[in-house]
Image: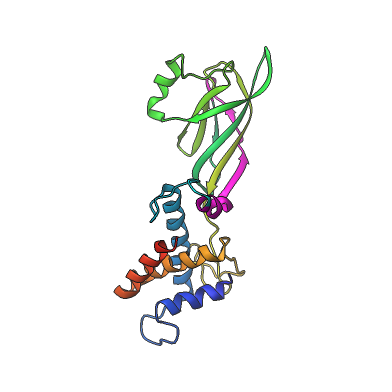
């Protein structure tokens, strides 16, 4: 969907399409509200805070709607004796999995099953014979801390490669000639929304609800909030 179409639809829903009153909506406000709405909508779908209570990949619709945000990156990992760490990518939003390939002197390289664990249970997991990293069983665990992925080896093996599969932040739209609310610079290009048109319609309703709340327009706020999830 074109940014011009999004702009028209937002103004129409706010009853500002032909309005010349004091609370006209400017383009930067539409951009800011739409980008905020994208993040809010995405987080709700991942967590299952929607009308049908479906979270990450719990239905065909959730898989279909969110697949565009699934990304893979090879982590630049560093050895820290009993674990390896790699920085999370900049547009990171939510963990999916990490694929690890391990090596030991006695054996050939093999893939590992990696579980995401709680940082607070680190010492318990490392000391538990049934849960600690094991090259023989092809299992280990990882934690998230300080913007990094820590993948534990307990000194039992080396990690040759680690690929992070994750949900990234939705791409922010920009409207050419409009002041970018994030950089305070005028946008020189049009950057469109990457979601399908049916999802964009829901995000428009979400953005309208945000803008209606900003200008204290109760009717539009209620309508936008209800419509954003009723058709999800």
**Can residue 217 be seen from the camera position used here?**
no
Q: Is residue 209 above or below residue 139?
A: below
Of 159 and 185, the residue lying toward us: 159
Residue drawn at (54%, 43%) of the image: 166
**Can residue 146 be seen from the camera position used here?**
yes
Q: Is residue 51 magenta?
A: no
> Looking at the picture, how far across and down is residue 29, in whole percent?
44, 71
User: In the image, 20: left or right of 196?
Assistant: left
Q: Is residue 225 above or below residue 149?
A: below
Residue drawn at (54%, 64%) of the image: 173
Residue drawn at (40%, 63%) of the image: 230
Q: Is residue 78 magenta?
A: yes
**Residue at the right extreme, as displayed:** 108
Q: Is residue 9 above or below residue 67?
A: below
> Looking at the picture, how far across and down is residue 10, in whole percent?
46, 74
Q: How many marks?
A: 0
Quadrant containing the C terminus in the rendered view: bottom left
Residue drawn at (67%, 13%) of the image: 105
Quadrant of the rendered image containing residue 127: top left
Q: How is the image coloured?
A: rainbow
**Residue at the top extreme, as displayed:** 106
> Looking at the picture, how far across and down is residue 89, in whole percent?
56, 44
> Looking at the picture, how far across and down is residue 147, in whole percent?
48, 39
Quadrant of the rendered image containing residue 1: bottom right
Of 136 and 94, the residue lying toward us: 136
What span is colored magenta in the figure? Answer: 61-83
């Amino acid at each position: 969907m074109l940014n011009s179409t999004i702009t028209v639809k937002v103004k129409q829903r706010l009853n500002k399409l032909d309005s010349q009153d004091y609370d006209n909506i400017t383009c930067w406000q539409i951009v800011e509200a739409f980008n905020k709405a994208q993040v809010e909508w995405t987080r709700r779908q991942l967590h299952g805070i929607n009308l049908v209570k479906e979270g990450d990949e719990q239905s065909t619709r959730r898989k279909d709607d969110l697949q565009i945000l699934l990304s893979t990156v090879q982590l630049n990992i560093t050895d820290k004796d009993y674990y390896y760490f790699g920085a999370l990518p900049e547009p990171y939003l939510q963990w999916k999995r990490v694929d690890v390939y391990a090596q030991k002197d006695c054996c050939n390289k093999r893939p590992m099953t990696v579980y995401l664990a709680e940082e607070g249970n680190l010492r318990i997991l490392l000391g538990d014979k049934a849960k600690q990293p094991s090259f023989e069983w092809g299992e280990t665990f990882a934690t998230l801390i300080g913007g990094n992925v820590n993948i534990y080896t307990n000194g039992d093996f080396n990690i040759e490669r680690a690929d992070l599969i994750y949900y990234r932040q939705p791409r922010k739209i920009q409207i050419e000639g409009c002041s970018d609310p994030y950089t305070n610079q005028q946008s020189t290009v049009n950057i469109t929304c990457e979601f399908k048109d049916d999802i964009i319609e829901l995000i428009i309703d979400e953005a309208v609800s945000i803008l209606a709340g900003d200008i204290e327009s109760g009717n539009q706020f209620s309508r936008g909030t209800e419509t954003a999830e009723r058709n999800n």
